[in-house]
Amino acid sequence: MGRSDHYELVFTHPGAPAAVPEAADVVEVHRTDRSGPGGHPVYADDTGIVLAEISDRDEVRMLASGGHQDPAAAVQVRPA
């Protein structure tokens, strides 16, 4: 896909089929000036709470923005 300045992160509820739109939460994120642990750009939502490192192959690594967080493991990404 390549790199975009904005993405949508799609979080599917556990046990729900991914094809059902109501079974997912979508968060729009924008590129920041930071890089993640893998050297790829970090994207954040407007609150700065949702942080994700997105590779040039559209692989997503959720990052904790504060203590006591358990970042989601299964997240899909699509251009916004």
Image (spheres, grey):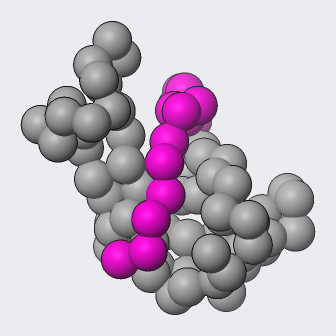
Residue 14 coordinates in the image, percent (x, y): 36, 17
Quadrant in which residue 50 is drawn: bottom left
Q: Residue at x 35, y 77 (%)?
A: 80
Residue 67 coordinates in the image, percent (x, y): 57, 35
Residue found at the far front of this picture: 19
18 to the left or right of 39: left
Residue 68 coordinates in the image, percent (x, y): 54, 27
Quadrant in which residue 39 is drawn: bottom right
The reply to whether the magenta stretch includes residue 32 is no
Q: Residue at x 85, y 57 (%)?
A: 37
49 to the left or right of 52: left
**Where 32 falls versus 37 (above or below)?**
below
**Where 44 falls versus 18 (above or below)?**
below
Q: Which residues are magenta?
A: 67-80
Q: Is residue 48 visible?
A: no
Principal SS element in the magenta part?
A: loop
**Where 60 falls versus 32 (above or below)?**
above
Residue found at the far left of this picture: 22
Residue 55 coordinates in the image, percent (x, y): 74, 66
Residue found at the far top of this picture: 15
Quadrant in which residue 19 is drawn: top left
Judging depth in this view, the residue of 59 and 39 nearest the camera is: 59
32 to the left or right of 35: left
Q: Residue at x 41, y 56 (%)?
A: 9
